[in-house]
Amino acid sequence: MAVTVTQECIGCGVCEQVCPFGAIEMQGSKAFITEACTQCGACVGVCPVKAIQREDEAKQVTMDKTEYRDVWVFVEVAEGKPRSVGLELLGEGRKLADFMGQNLAGVLIGNNIAELTNEVFAAGANKVYLVEADELAHYNTDGYTATFTDLINTYKPSVILMGATNDGRDLGPRVACRVGTGLTADCTGLGIDEATGLVAWTRPAFGGNIMATILCPEHRPQMGTVRPSVFKRQVPDYTRSGEIVRVASKVKSQDIRTKLIDVLKVCTASCNLEEAEIIVSGGRGLCKPENFTLVEELANVLGGAVGASRAAVDAGWKPAIHQIGQTGKTVGPKIYFACGISGAIQHMAGMSSSDIIIAINKDPDAPIFNMADYGIVGDVAEVLPVLTEEFRKIKAS
Ligand code: FAD
Ligand code: SF4
Ligand code: SF4
């Protein structure tokens, strides 16, 4: 696509004012489109003499979309178990597959993982593509990209869902590029566009100020990564079964440019936020870094994980792996304690699907109370030790 200004331009300057990217400069009595243009099209309709044109490049799509069928979910494996996000996506993928009247398949890549097929069927799939090889025992970019690309080229799925995890974010765009399709990253919602029947991928845009819904009309498969904990995991049904398609790996050890030397576990139970049933989070209202021990003590007593607002992370009170929110992790625990957190929209974006939210804040008008199920108005430094002590007593009895 290209946006151009024709000779008819009368230099009125209207387009310069509407361009959200400052991409139009007036040069003498003519408008000039600079390299900052994102081809958003906002200027096209405002020109009083229709001097701005946006040309679509001739579409060179030769893909036969009818060849592509079925919904796939990449089920990541970590320490011999499927990651929670893969099972959450199977539940959501089941709904899409049922609507489209197609199969839901889980994709399992690893080594000695055949027994996990039961978990994948129980979570909603009726088919599993299973690739096992020594070279795939741990996630590696080269081996997994080649394997996934090969699966797509052979079996031609219509839709692929992946977790927006470290591995999913590494794998998804590479695979999409190899097979010549697009990818909507970091989705927070999935649906079906009624007019086209395409998957409607929803994700925050422009700093979270709007939610954008994206379609992939010209290419297949339709691909997206979805944040962990956005969808609730369905209750597994172990009476379910399905077809297992074993696919031989074509990856050779010399194809893999990286070598796994060691795995260092920096994340203990306290930062395993995506899997935690209880999370105790602290914000700027803790007032000083030492007060995070109050949050940690409550989390310890409850067997929960420790979260933090971005303000607390930016202040250096907690490492970024604890951050919850739009630019941190998305969580969905049974209970979420927000301690000294105001409830900014960007924080809420990461924890609003928690079952029960308990807020502690000294300001009774703090926005977090609008979302909280239970609110305690008070100083965190006083309230937290009391709560911890009470829970400790209850547990002991
Ligand atoms: P504050 O907003 O300063 O709130 C502190 C709260 O503590 C106040 O409500 C105050 O009343 C209360 N308080 C003060 N003292 C006490 C006390 N002694 N006892 C009890 N309560 C007390 N934020 C995130 O958290 N996660 C994100 O991922 C994220 N991403 C962002 C992305 C973008 C693009 C932008 C622009 C912002 C993002 N933010 C994010 C920042 C967000 O807008 C807020 O600035 C941030 O969440 C505020 O953190 P806070 O609630 O800890 O601090
Ligand atoms: Fe600006 Fe959009 Fe027009 Fe490009 S298409 S010049 S970005 S308004
Ligand atoms: Fe030229 Fe049209 Fe822009 Fe006016 S709005 S400066 S006529 S291109």
Image (tube, grey):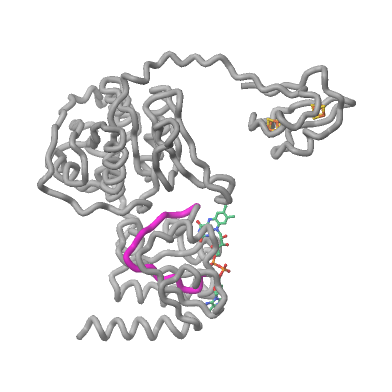
Residue 136 placement, left or right of 50? left
Which residue is depicted at the point 34% across and 39% down?
A: 162
Residue 89 in sight from this viewpoint: yes
Question: Is 157 rendered above or below residue 87?
Answer: above
User: Looking at the rendering, in which quadrant would you find the N terminus?
Assistant: top right
Residue 82 drawn at (x, y percent): 23, 46
| Farthest residue, direction right | 28
Residue 149 drawn at (x, y percent): 32, 25
Question: Is 262 rendered above or below residue 384?
Answer: above
Principal SS element in the magenta part? loop
Residue 189 placement, left or right of 7? left
Residue 380 drawn at (x, y percent): 47, 80
Question: Is 263 rendered above or below residue 12?
Answer: below
Give the tally of numbered discs: 0
Question: Is 135 rendered above or below residue 204?
Answer: above
Residue 245 placement, left or right of 342? left
| Residue 321 belongs to magenta span | no
Residue 41 placement, left or right of 296? right
Q: Pick whichever, 140 or 168, lies toward us.
A: 168
Q: Pick whichever, 70 or 258, lies toward us.
A: 70
Image quadrant in which you'd find residue 107:
top left
Residue 256 in sight from this viewpoint: no
Q: Magenta segment range?
A: 327-341
The quarter of the image that holds ligand 2 is: top right
Residue 143 drawn at (x, y percent): 30, 29
Image quadrant in which you'd find residue 62:
top left
Q: Pick whichever, 119 or 192, lies toward us.
A: 192
Which residue is depicted at the point 37% across and 63% down?
A: 354
Which residue is depicted at the point 42% across and 56% down?
A: 321
User: Looking at the rendering, in which quadrant would you find the C terminus?
Assistant: bottom left
